[in-house]
Amino acid sequence: MRVLILGGDGYLGWPTAMHFAAAGHDVGAVDNYARRRIASETDSLPLFATPDLAQRAQRFEATSNHHIDVWIGDCTDYAFLSEVVRAFQPEAIIHFAEQPSAPYSMKDFATARFTLNNNLNTTFNVLWAIHEHAPQCHLVKLGTMGEYGTPNIDIEEGWIDIHHNGRQDRFLFPRQAGSLYHTTKVLDTDLIWFYVRTWGLKCTDLMQGPVYGLFTPQSRLDKALLPNFHYDDIFGTVLNRFIVQVAAGVPMTVYGKGGQVRGYLNLLDTLQCLELAITRPPADGELRILNQFTETFSVNELAERVKDAAAGLGITADIKPIANPRNEKEEHYYNPKFTGFKALGLKPHPLTSEVLAEMIDYAVSLKDNIVPKRIFPRVSWN
Ligand code: USQ
């Protein structure tokens, strides 16, 4: 299959590009290095430097003999994106090309404006490029579990049947996000649903939870092929941050009461979910929404697990709750459905002490790279 990955230099985009190329697909990867720019501007560089997308693709080809086509450009530029789609003729587009940090979106007016413009305009351009140049293409869009927020009812898989005054219909499940970044994903979903209804596109919207991990069969081939690993407050996701905090000998930064529950998954399961989504596409005119996580944990439970795994390595890890920089519920009901990917055949990789130990070991080997001032929250929601 011809698979185009937008945001191909990212934490998820790069492992995805290698995964699909290794599986024998024709892969194109597009990126404008926005994350690298923001990381540099906000002093949020990752645990180790990674080669740029063109260099990574060359290294991957030299190591594995699999080719990845690379385009460096901005998906908010319609002339650029539509030409890539016209020339490559993708059968599937995996759209990761968004500003992914909730804290960055809440930093100031300029970062909020950038997040809104970048995320909405990219999704809008992708929909138009598919409509004009590849109408049979399956759009696989990375949304987020954060679109739903933390409602006091069970979270369905994208849709809910509503009975009202003796009649009933099916609607998008109510969304109430907790940051501007998460809100842009809500707006993306509405935009996609509008064009699916209007043009009959086929789309899969993935409601993904926070991802952890570093190692995939391809990233293990060569250290230069590892994904960007952030531990800073801007781009680092909570479990990856805790791992590096333990390696640095800094107490784990549980925000507030630590009862915030989210659905987590291993990077390996992101790849598996994408493969399942692409090889089993929805029908024309269907917006399929799949919840993408494998296990739910509170922040306190995650910290305890990391602490136990560290103890197994002879490392004493501390947990220190700090004031929550975010506006979010710290104790709440959370029961999201997770049936779609199970039905498609997902075999989850659970968060075991072995998985944690391997990550902690790797972070400890790079202890000298850790810059403590990148760890503590620098952005407040207020
Ligand atoms: N948290 C802590 N301590 C920390 C960092 C985070 O207690 O040091 C808490 C947060 O307050 C939150 C939870 O951990 O309650 C998850 O935070 P996160 O930073 O791992 O995740 P989030 O900001 O929601 O965003 C990440 C990705 C985003 C993706 C989202 C999935 O950056 O791109 O969409 O996970 S979800 O959380 O399901 O919306």
Image: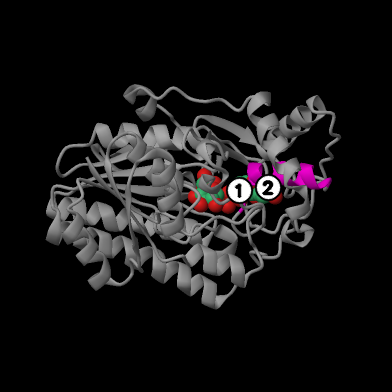
**With 277 as the anchor, is 132 left or right in this view?**
left
Q: Does mark 1 have its CB less than 8 Å from ligand 1? A: yes
Q: Position of residue 302 (x, y in %)?
A: 68, 35
- Name which residue type carries label 1: Thr
Q: Which residue is mark 2?
A: 241
Comparing 129 with 253, the one in front is 129
User: What's the CA distance linking mark 1 and mark 2?
Assistant: 6 Å
Residue numbers of the magenta segment: 236-249
Q: Residues within 10 Å of mark 2 (few under 14, many from 20)?
A: many
Comparing 378 with 213, the one in front is 213
Cβ atoms under marks 1 and 2 closer than 8 Å: yes
Q: Residue at x 35, y 29 (%)?
A: 340
Q: Is residue 70 magenta?
A: no
Q: Residue 307 has which mark?
A: none
Q: Which residue is mark 1?
A: 237
Say above or below: 271 vs 176: above
